[in-house]
Image (cartoon, coloured by chain):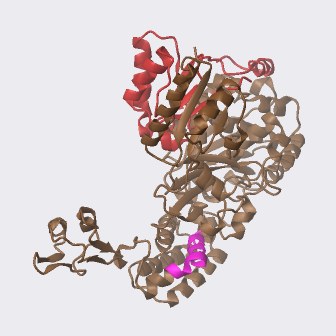
Amino acid sequence: MPKLNKESLEAFKSTGAAAQDEYIKVGMSTCGLAAGSDAVYRVLVDEIKMRSLNIPVLKCGCNGMCYAEPLVEVRVSGLPTVTYGKVTEEIAIRIVEKHVVEKLLLNETIYDCRYQELK
Amino acid sequence: MHNKEVFVRDTNSTGIESTREFFSRFLDAIRKKGLNEQVLMVRSSDMGIYKKGMAVKILPDNIIYQNVQDADIERIINETLISNRVIEGLLYKVSPAQMRIVLRNCGKIDPDNLEDYLIAGGYQGLKKVLFEMTPENVISDLKKAGLRGRGGAGYPTWTKWNITKNIKVAEKFIICNADEGDPGAYMDRSILEGDPHSVMEGMIIAGRTCGATRGFFYIRAEYPLAVERVKRAIAQCYESSLLGKNILGSDFSFDVEIRLGAGAFVCGEETALIASIEGKRGTPKPRPPYPSVRGLWDKPTVINNVETLANVSYIFLRGSEAFSKIGTASSKGTKVFAVTGKVKNSGLVEVPMGTTLRQIVHETCGGTRSEKEVKAVQTGGPSGGVIPNEYLDTPVDYENLQKLGSIMGSGGMIVMDTDDCMVDIAKFYQQFCVDESCGKCAPCRIGGFQLLNILKNICAGKGKLEDLTTLKRISKAMQKASLCGLGQSAPNPVLSTLKYFEAEYKEHILNKKCRAGKCTALLNFSIIQEKCKRCAACVRHCPSFAISGDREKGFVIDMQKCAKCSSCLEVCKFKAIRKE
């Protein structure tokens, strides 16, 4: 990260919405880690790599739904942004197979679904 | 590709059967209309809606229907899916209780990536403060916003900053109090782990406004992940000229470092915290002088809670009015609560001040896990009190909770159902305060210990009626004469439970009975002879050999030998063991 100054910081103001279009986000705060999200994260990274898919696997903090950790948020074009909860390593693999590749949503693991507003 | 997504969930059930059945019927109807290419049907696990029957959520329209019957399926398909019309009568109209201000980026950005924070508007507030505002402007904006300290005391933040700002000395300090010692509270941990820069920005703004040169994060050692993420954030800030000399090319220089706590609850108290940073034992000092006048190394020091600083960065990003329009007249903004205990969905809930406890506990968190009634909600940790069920419609703010005999505290909210014993709760918090008392002043050191002894006796069936008067007298003495907040507020759970649940205390003392079934010394196990099939399973499982008898005459539990372990209750297939 280069040194910032008043002008370069100003430039960030007009960048608008988050840079990534498609992503997989895993909750990696203490609540998530305690529920096993580091294993889920590794499985997702491995699956994506194995299938040579072009979608970043990111980390994020606690979004408040601690009871449903490990949480995985998936945004893939053409589908709403979906948050899967109580994700196990098996479900993580299915997320890649079904959601990312086949563009189908998994049943019985969705805890939140919405279309993200663009800033 | 489909153009509509339909999510279904039976919000009255925790299982998946009823959802699956409704789903099949809906899917059938979709297929009959030839719409299965355009409509993607999904079974949801949880929609954040509770006890509203069958819920149907339709995207991208973002329409949620509740209490949907089978007969409504046709209508929904025809009117909403095909003709894009909303069926008013089925709409789930409750507006979402949560408002994410402090947690605005948590769960969205990567906390280890400074760029994510910048893209989300990070450090724009600091830029404004450094280049477009004077310290007086900042104080006046903070006053207009109405921000009050989120550590629990609710002291107006602008006043604290103003006092320090107006003292003309070369060295002043800002401390971020991340000691978060309340059992069950983890809001500050989540903020530091999920969005450390929001707190950093608040601290640098505080430094600039008050004329401070150094900042300290005092983080409890029990939060290693938070320490790691804040450390990384500090390093990133030094790299990008957000800390150190001439921040962002301005004339302001500020240094920040981390200091670790070491397992003492009392070090969350500001004077004890300062002693800890100075390398001394964490014992409090009498105030005045307050830290804002004479604090760390006798220099003017502003100490703010993590959540307060995260609010500061928001206020200077979006403006004081964006903040002050939320909340009640006296308590502006939002509050993050860590809702735990016997609740169905525990987690962090951020709501505008003025939201009722019922909305938080029932609507957002789904009510009790056991489906039993909420007995009370404990707020404010070991310094707070219990709020019984009949006050669940109280709008939450600093003044209202105080009127009920509790406090807002740092935001821990523990939900209790009828299986919780109020005397046991008071005893638990008292044990905590006795363990954590620094021992410097007699009222806390001796009074706390005596309170605990009395509570232990009551729970063991050895209480006397005069004990209730003694509890109140000791409590009043501790409140008046203790040196710091720990001792002054340690009696709060005792006084609060006595105020609302005195009948339960008397039951323990006079009837030697614990209605919640929690105080093991008062439990009595007996065999219901009419239900007993004399299989002797309980005899075999009893670890104390307390059950005797035979197949002809029946079996009997000897309470003298009974260890109150409930093994017999758990192993009996005929529900023939009575526990009371």
Tell me the residue at 83%/50% (across/down): B162
Tell me the residue at 46%/46% (across/down): B14
Pick the front one: B117 or A23: A23
Q: Quadrant of the C terminus of chain A?
A: top right
Q: Residue furthest top?
A: A52
Question: What color does chain A have in the rendering?
Answer: red
User: For residue A117, what is the image quadrant?
Assistant: top right
Query: What x and y, as percent, mark residue B511?
Result: 42, 86
From the viewer's perspective, is residue B426 above or below residue B63? Answer: below
Q: Is residue A72 visible?
A: no
User: For residue B132, what is the image quadrant?
Assistant: top right
Residue B561 within the magenta-colored segment of the rendering: no
Pick the front one: B86 or B234: B86
Q: Is B316 left or right of B418, judged from the image as shown?
A: right
Q: Is B64 left or right of A51, judged from the image as shown?
A: right
Tell me the residue at 56%/87% (across/down): B469
From the viewer's perspective, is residue B526 above or below residue B116? Answer: below
Query: What x and y, as percent, mark residue B17?
Result: 42, 41
Pick the front one: B463 or B564: B564
From the viewer's perspective, is residue B91 above or below residue B166? Answer: above
Query: What x and y, as percent, mark residue B44?
Result: 51, 35
Give the dominant element type of the magenta stretch: helix, strand or loop.
helix
Q: Which residues are magenta?
A: B490-504
Q: Is residue B35 visible?
A: yes
Q: Quadrant of the N terminus of chain A?
A: top right
Question: What color does chain B have in the rendering?
Answer: brown
